[in-house]
């Protein structure tokens, strides 16, 4: 397998809320791909549709959400066309997920070691004793001290950071090809956040796992991801190399986000506000106008922006931007 | 007193279990084969500590052996009820949709008609005997287990660990019975414990009207039925099995109550 092969291809994915013909769309023709072993970031504010896209990728969309268009190709399978048994075999084995709430994502009544061991029994058909040995090794890999003892602990006996490490051990147990990390560090202390992220990245590098990192932390994403997609109101409005998103943001929304980041030591010119902001609010789902969704908050919008949805303008090399007036 | 219910209930129930297990050694006489009409209707005294019945059988021995039947009926019947109720309730809560509607309708139906009426109808069809008792009582009193397990599963279904289990690729059966069920077991244990008491009472009621345990096997309900005619002349024949029944049901209810207090963290904080 070549190194630049796409492991995940999402093409024109649209997700509606509700079953009616004109139900509002939570995600609108979302297209992106994740290459083997790459770290792909998705940023956007709450409700922009990034988590919903992640759910669709793992085949976990539940009513009232449903896909209305598009394909999700994982390796050579169309996720949206698989039956529930086929998709269960992928989940946990080839596609793994970690969540933002490590406090509650573990079964409170099962020993931590058993919860990890279950993965080996389920996906690799190991015997119980063999699975238990592997569970200890898995805990050791996520740098939990004295893993034998911790295996016998219940989740409530561990700290938040420890629990997230256990979740990572479970997710990485079967060396998945794709790890979906949905806000993996939001519920943790800042100091632990950095440790957890570098742990995830290190493990993924070892096993060649691609990461779909979903976050609203622009700094985190820019720092860790090879490529970043910025979502706004259900659409990907810009996709760039991770290191370029800060230095040369193109879409007015991305520019606004970058400008709004606090920068220690920056001198303020006369009359400049200490923190820039983007005026207005995200239009709620169902009240999004035709054309570009960012129009009400955009300084550059004109009549064309209100009528037509801007198509992706390919950038030199990797990435695109959906704006008539980018740059 | 802290956890008085639990302590008293546990004592009564464990005593009942010991008595039932050791009945052949504890009983001074054989419950059915020792029947001497010369001793019929003797009041409590020696050697018949609780007196004798109208056929000259030792009341104490019959009560001790009766505990075996009561306990067996209680445990088997409630296990069946729990199995049926929990299976229906958990699947209804987890899957929802038409299955949930169906199970709920069935539960409401069972709740609307008193259990004993259903059991009576079934017993009439099946005829008296232990096996019929198990079937008649074990398939008719599952509505509480069902309702409670459904409600509990509904509240757990949205918990993150359940969703996490889905993303890890576990089957629905695994998620329902290995992940969720242990987390909702507390209230179900309480319901089941109290259910044992009511099953014992139902058995006694059915035996009382002649539809339960076949004579001469000693069942508390059956003993009460025949003692009724001599209530004026030989009240002990009725009083002692009645007391045994009373304390047994009381014991299971108190145990259930005590378990509920024990398993409810809020209640625990208040004591």
Image (spheres, grey):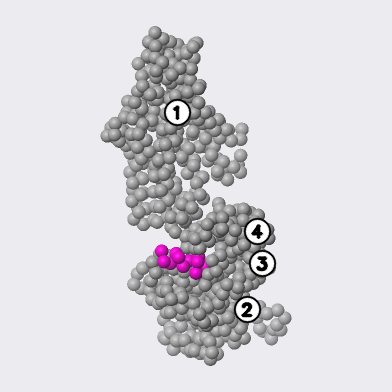
Q: Nearer the viewer, residue B24 or B184?
A: B24
Mark 4 lies on residue: A147
**Which residue sits at x=56%, y=53%?**
A110
**Mark 3 crowdedness (10 Å alpha carbons): few <14, some 14-19, many ≥20:** some
Chain identity of mark 1: B
Q: Earlier in the sequence, mark 2 or mark 3?
A: 3
Q: Is residue A127 above or below residue B260?
A: below
User: Disc 1 or disc 2, which is closer to the eye?
Assistant: 1
Mark 2 lies on residue: A223
Q: Mark 1 touching mark 4, by CB under 8 A?
A: no
Residue at disc 3, secondary structure = helix
Q: Earlier in the sequence, mark 4 or mark 3?
A: 4
**Which residue sits at x=44%, y=35%?**
B75
User: Disc 4 or disc 3, which is closer to the eye?
Assistant: 4
- Which residues make up the magenta segment? A85-97
Determine if residue A25 is in view: no
Q: Mark 1 touching mark 3, by CB under 8 A?
A: no
Residue A179 is situated, as x and y percent measured from the top left of the image, at 54, 71
User: Disc 1 or disc 3, which is closer to the eye?
Assistant: 1
- Image check: B37 left or right of B27? left
Q: Mark 4 touching mark 2, by CB under 8 A?
A: no
Mark 3 lies on residue: A192
Chain identity of mark 3: A
Q: Mark 2 touching mark 3, by CB under 8 A?
A: no
**Mark 4 crowdedness (10 Å alpha carbons): few <14, some 14-19, many ≥20:** some
Is residue B6 found inside the magenta-colored segment of the image? no
Q: Is residue B209 above or below residue A300?
A: above
- Image check: A238 left or right of A276? left
Rendered image: mark on residue B68: 1
**Which residue sits at x=39%, y=52%?**
B92
Q: Residue furthest bottom?
A: A316
Residue at disc 4, secondary structure = helix
């Amino acid at each position: 397998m070549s190194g630049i092969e796409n492991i995940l291809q999402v093409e024109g994915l649209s997700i509606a809320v509700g079953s009616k013909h004109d139900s509002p769309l939570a995600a609108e023709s979302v297209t992106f791909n994740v290459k083997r072993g790459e770290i792909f970031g998705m940023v956007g504010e709450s409700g922009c549709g990034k988590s919903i896209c992640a759910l669709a990728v793992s085949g976990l969309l539940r009513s009232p959400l449903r896909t209305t268009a598009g394909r999700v190709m994982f390796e050579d399978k169309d996720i949206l066309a698989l039956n529930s048994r086929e998709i269960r075999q992928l989940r946990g084995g080839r596609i793994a997920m970690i969540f933002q709430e490590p406090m509650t994502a573990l079964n409170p009544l099962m020993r931590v070691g058993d919860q990890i061991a279950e993965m080996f029994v389920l996906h690799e058909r190991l015997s119980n004793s063999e699975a238990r040995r592997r569970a200890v090794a898995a805990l050791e890999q996520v740098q939990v001290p004295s893993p034998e003892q911790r295996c016998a602990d219940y989740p409530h006996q561990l700290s938040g950071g420890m629990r997230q490490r256990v979740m990572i051990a479970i997710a990485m147990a079967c060396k998945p090809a794709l790890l979906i990390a949905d806000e993996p560090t939001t519920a943790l202390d800042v100091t632990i956040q950095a440790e957890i992220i570098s742990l995830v990245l290190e493990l993924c590098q070892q096993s060649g796992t691609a990461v779909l990192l979903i976050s609203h932390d622009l700094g985190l994403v820019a720092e860790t991801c090879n490529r970043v997609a910025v979502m706004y109101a259900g659409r990907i409005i810009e996709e760039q190399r991770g290191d370029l998103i800060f230095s040369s943001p193109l879409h007015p929304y991305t520019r606004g986000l970058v400008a709004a980041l606090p920068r220690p030591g920056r001198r303020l010119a006369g009359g400049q506000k200490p923190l820039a902001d983007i005026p207005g609010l995200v239009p709620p789902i169902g009240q999004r106008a035709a054309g570009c969704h960012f129009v009400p908050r955009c300084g550059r919008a004109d009549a064309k922006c209100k009528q037509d949805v801007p198509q992706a303008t390919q950038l030199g090399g990797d990435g695109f931007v959906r704006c008539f007036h980018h740059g | 007193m802290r956890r008085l219910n639990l302590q008293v209930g546990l004592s009564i129930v464990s005593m009942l279990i010991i008595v039932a297990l050791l009945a052949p050694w504890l009983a001074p006489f054989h419950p059915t084969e020792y029947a001497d009409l010369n001793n019929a209707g003797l009041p409590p005294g020696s050697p018949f500590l609780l007196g004798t019945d109208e056929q000259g059988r030792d009341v104490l021995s019959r009560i001790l052996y009766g505990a075996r039947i009561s306990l067996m009926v209680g445990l088997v019947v409630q296990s069946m009820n729990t199995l049926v109720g929990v299976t229906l309730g958990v699947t209804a809560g987890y899957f929802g949709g038409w299955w949930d509607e169906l199970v709920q309708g069935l539960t409401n139906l069972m709740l609307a008609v008193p259990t004993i009426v259903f059991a009576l109808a079934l017993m009439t069809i099946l005829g008296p005997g232990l096996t019929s008792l198990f079937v008649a009582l074990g398939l008719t009193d599952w509505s509480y287990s069902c309702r409670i397990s459904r409600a509990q599963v509904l509240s757990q279904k949205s918990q993150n660990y359940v969703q996490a289990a889905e993303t890890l690729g576990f089957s629905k059966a695994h998620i329902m019975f290995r992940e969720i069920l242990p987390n909702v077991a507390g209230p179900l244990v309480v319901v089941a414990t109290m259910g044992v008491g009511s099953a014992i009472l139902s058995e006694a009621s059915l035996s009382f009207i002649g539809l339960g345990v076949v004579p001469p096997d000693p069942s508390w309900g059956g003993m009460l039925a025949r003692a009724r005619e001599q209530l004026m002349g030989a009240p002990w024949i009725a009083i002692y099995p009645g007391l045994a029944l009373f304390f047994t049901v009381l014991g299971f209810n108190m145990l259930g109550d005590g378990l509920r207090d024990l398993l409810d963290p809020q209640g625990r904080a208040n004591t």
